[in-house]
Image: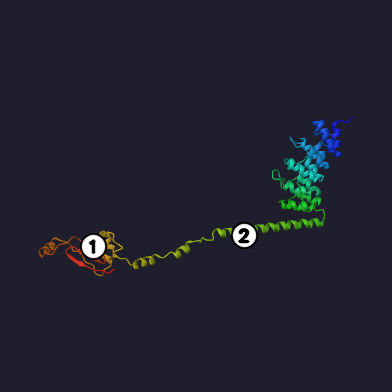
Amino acid sequence: MIDASTRLRRAILLSDALLVKRIIRSNPAILQNPDFKNKSNTSLHLAAQAGFEEIVELLVDAGHDHGEISRNADWDTPLMLAARHGNVDVGILLANRFPRSIPVTNKSGLDALALSCLNPASTPLVSLLLSHPEYPASADCRDNHGDTPLHHASASGSLKALRILLSAGADPTAKNAYDWTPLAYSQTVAAEVYFKNLVAELERRKVEDMRGEKERREEAMKRKYAGVRLVTEDSEASSRPSDDMARSESSNSISSPIDQRNAFTPTVAKSNPWVSGGFETRARAWSGDKKSRTKRTAAGIPTWSPTVVLICRSTAYVWQSGRDAQFSADC
């Protein structure tokens, strides 16, 4: 009688989903069922390599790889085998159900992206693996020989993969351990010309994007500082009136005693134009000695205290001790 593990492998290879479901239900312990005679491939490895999407989904729903991603003797995951053999639908299913397996590498240093670039039939997987939101693949990852996904795409002649990788930021000048660039692995002259044109086109777009970004920044700065005038020291000095002009304007300004009714002090009175500088004739203050005061008292002339300044509306009066002098000035 054939054991259950052998019958399960045969049912998977025959793509008999009903039989696979029946065997798993009867023997849940052999769900993974590694085959030690064939690189320890599990049930999911066999289904992914064969491209049986229905059986792959059945095994995943039954709990396959829910705890840990299964790997064979070459450290290949089921996603790697699907990418290597061009099984796009199975690869998309496994990448969505087990995204943490995307950046995993095997013994040769190859990940699912590099294996997808080796097979032109797996090109649709390239964009999916590069743009995954949680575990994106790297466009510049290297294997044990220093080859990047761009090296593998160029060697396999996958022109669409070349365009996708270059658009994702892959370096076209990267050299492997043998000092070869991806361009050197072009299969045909036409592929080499196509590769060069792709690189030139992307460089031109990059320059245009940089120029457009610079113009947008300059336009934003213009809008931001549209109402601001730059004032330098020279312009400020030229726009500021000189001290001589300021003094000239202040001396020519018309003032009246009505506007200046503040009480005067002797110091202020000396510098006030209505008292000292506003008249051509200046009354000399009387010395106020004792002899002069006696003469004026005997003559009936009253004696006055030192200089008193009175401003009454439009006439300025200056009273001095011993004599009186009246000056009028029209406002």
Which residue extends farthest top?
A: 1
Work out which quarter of the rendered image holds the C terminus and state it.
bottom left
Q: Secondary structure at mark 1?
A: strand
Q: Earlier in the sequence, mark 2 or mark 1?
A: 2
Q: Nearer the viewer, residue 90 or 61?
A: 61
State the mark number for residue 214: none
Q: Nearer the viewer, residue 58 or 268?
A: 58
Q: Against 214, is 121 above or below?
A: above
Position of 73 compared to 265: left or right?
A: right
Residue 94 place in picture, x, y as percent: 76, 42
Residue at x-position 68% and y-position 56%: 206
Residue at x-position 81% and y-position 32%: 25
Residue at x-position 26% and y-position 62%: 269
Density class for disc 1 (Cα within 10 Å; few <14, some 14-19, many ≥20) is some
Q: Nearer the viewer, residue 316 or 114?
A: 316
Residue 256 place in picture, x, y as percent: 30, 65
Residue 170 place in picture, x, y as percent: 72, 51
Regarding residue 173, the answer to whether it shows in the image is: no
Mark 2: amino acid: Glu
Q: Secondary structure at mark 2?
A: helix
Q: Which residue is mark 2?
A: 215
Q: Which residue is mark 1?
A: 309
* Rendering quarter of residue 266: bottom left
